[in-house]
Amino acid sequence: MESQVVKSEQAAGPTMVMLQMIVNFWVSRTIYVAAKLGLADLVKNEAKTADELAQLTNTHAPSLYRVLRALASVGVFVDDGRGRFAQTPLSETLRSDTPGSLRAMAMVELGQEHFPAWGNLMHSVKTGEIAFDNLFKQNVWEYYAQNPEDASNFNEAMKGLTEMVNVSVLWAYDFSGVNKLVDVAGGTGGLISAVLNAHPRMRGVLFDLPHVIAEAGPSLEAAGVRDRCETATGDFFESLPEGGDAYVMKWIIHDWNDERSTAILKNIRRVMNENGKLLLIETVVPEGNGPDLSKFLDLNMMVMTGGCERTEAEFSSLLAAAGFKLTRVIRTASPVCVIEAVRS
Ligand SMILES: C[S@@+](CC[C@H](N)C(=O)[O-])C[C@H]1O[C@@H](n2cnc3c(N)ncnc32)[C@H](O)[C@@H]1O
């Protein structure tokens, strides 16, 4: 009897941890509802009851109350004891007007594109194919080109994540020798704006697909860099802006397999200045079993784009195949590294 008690106590730890891991998606999907309804914006200035929030969001008050109670149990909003829900540091991150906002990210990851693709993870594991493409019968970039609302939300999510890592990148890497910086597939310009603002004499070129650049003007304007940052549109498998002395790509190479990545890198090599630098901003998968964002981000790439996160050795051989030599991998205070390369 005694030994059985000991065994069940031992089992309780891992069992509870596993149960929590299994049901983590309950939390994620509830966060999605809060993000989509904009609840964090609605309690920005004052706490509100579930009834008030239901009226403002056109939802069913008793159900919304249960959502808020569940979220408050994990620190997202807090019940003030008088039936009103107030902001917390965690719910604050879901406000749409906060720097580094995760609201759009919650909607992108947990809404109608990434979440169904993750539901189809088994397809990727069994076949090596892209789960998203298998479900949607097109790739994610084609999907965004045809679904402007989702594309805007994706761009907004990228902007929020970029704001989150910008300072760490600027601390870690010295851009001061660069006269003309080209941000290849730079989205709506969050990174290039931050670099240009830190370096008042630098000029920039922001390059991306046409529907993305169409949304970039207001961001560049708001950042005060519109006059120093040209925009250019195109497909990086075809052509790229010429003559930059540094080409930066953040979260681009991880979207593509080795063959497609090599094609992009070779195109950059062709257009960059003789002594130009290539800067990849990516997570780098560490050795060992320790937890690291890169290891699940890698699966996100598996289901969404067919790309992957890479180790330092994998980056080195990928770059070598495209005619580059990896010179440095600079860790930052955020999950991304700056991988610097020059022509070999
Ligand atoms: C993961 S997002 C990263 C955006 C930005 N660099 C950032 O970190 O916020 C990938 C970007 O690649 C762009 N993209 C995808 N295919 C492209 C292509 N063939 N040519 C140019 N840009 C492309 C997308 O429009 C998107 O902005």
Image (cartoon, rainbow, N blue to C red):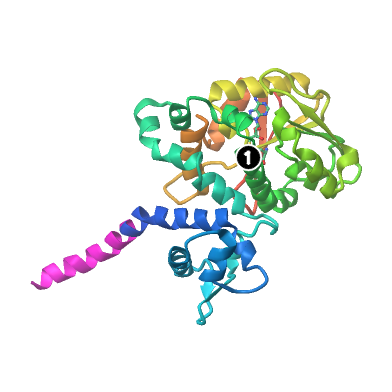
Q: For residue 341, which quarter of the picture?
A: top right
Q: Judge by depth and name the residue closer to the eye, 326 or 144.
A: 144
Residue drawn at x 51%, y 39% is 113
- What is the quadrant of the N terminus in the image? bottom left
In the image, residue 335 above or below residue 227: below
Magenta segment boundaries in residue numbering: 1-18
Q: Classify the position of ligand 1 by quadrant: top left, top right, bottom left or bottom right.
A: top right
Residue 293 location (% of width, % of height): 51, 48
Q: For residue 235, which quarter of the picture?
A: top right
User: Secondary structure under badge 1?
Assistant: helix
Q: Is residue 331 visible?
A: no
Left or right side of 261 for 82: left
Q: For residue 208, which quarter of the picture?
A: top right
Q: Judge by depth and name the residue closer to the eye, 77 or 53.
A: 53
Residue drawn at x 53%, y 64% is 54
* Residue pointed to by mark 1: 149
Left or right side of 87 for 287: left
